[in-house]
Amino acid sequence: METSEILAVIAIVISLFLFIRVISLQSQMNNIKADLEWMRNRAGSQSVPVPAATSPTPSGGQETADSALDERLLFLLQSGQKIKAIKEIREVRSLGLKEAKEYVEALERNV
């Protein structure tokens, strides 16, 4: 292999790496924009309707007390990010996938 061919292969590999990195940064920027928009909407509104859904928690089905989390989930649902909402409730409440999906769908129905 000649030197020019080696340099071309290295340039292609670096280009691929940079392309993947740009896509990753774009995704992170979109998440930050969504979070910022949620914060703006939250600060701008005095009252947000909170559904009367119950949350299946590991401690045994207590009613939802964290309206800020529900507010965040509602924002994600309105933004068309249902999967992200399910992921977030799973992380915060340590729920299984089925329970988190049911919770988010109940939230969606009660809006």
Image: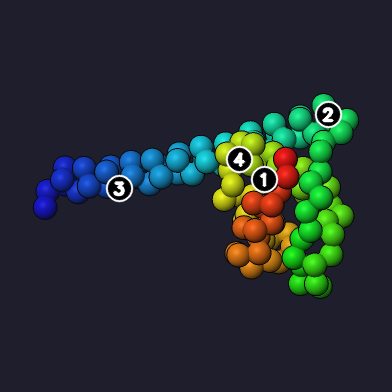
Of labels 3 and 4, the one closer to you: 4
What is the three-letter code of the residue carrying label 4? Asn
- The residue at which mark 1 appears reads as 108
Question: Residue 106 at what x, y percent from top left?
Answer: 69, 52
Q: Is residue 50 left or right of residue 97?
A: right
Instruction: Looking at the image, tell me whether mark 1 or mark 4 is earlier in sequence order.
Output: 4
Q: CA distance from mark 3 to mark 4?
A: 28 Å
Compare marks 1 and 2 and give the one earlier in the sequence: 2
Q: CA distance from mark 2 to mark 4?
A: 21 Å
Q: Is residue 36 left or right of residue 54?
A: left
Query: Looking at the image, which residue is at 68% across and 46% down?
Result: 109
Which of the pair 37/7 is nearer the observer? Answer: 37
Q: Which residue in the protein does label 3 denote?
A: 13
Q: Residues within 10 Å of mark 4 (few under 14, many from 20)?
A: few
For the residue labelled by badge 1, is the local secondary structure a helix, a strand or a loop?
A: helix
Q: Tell me the SS state at disc 4.
A: helix
Question: Nearer the N terminus, badge 2 or badge 4?
Answer: 4
Write down the residue under mark 2: 45
Q: Which residue is mark 4?
A: 31
Q: CA distance from mark 1 to mark 3?
A: 44 Å
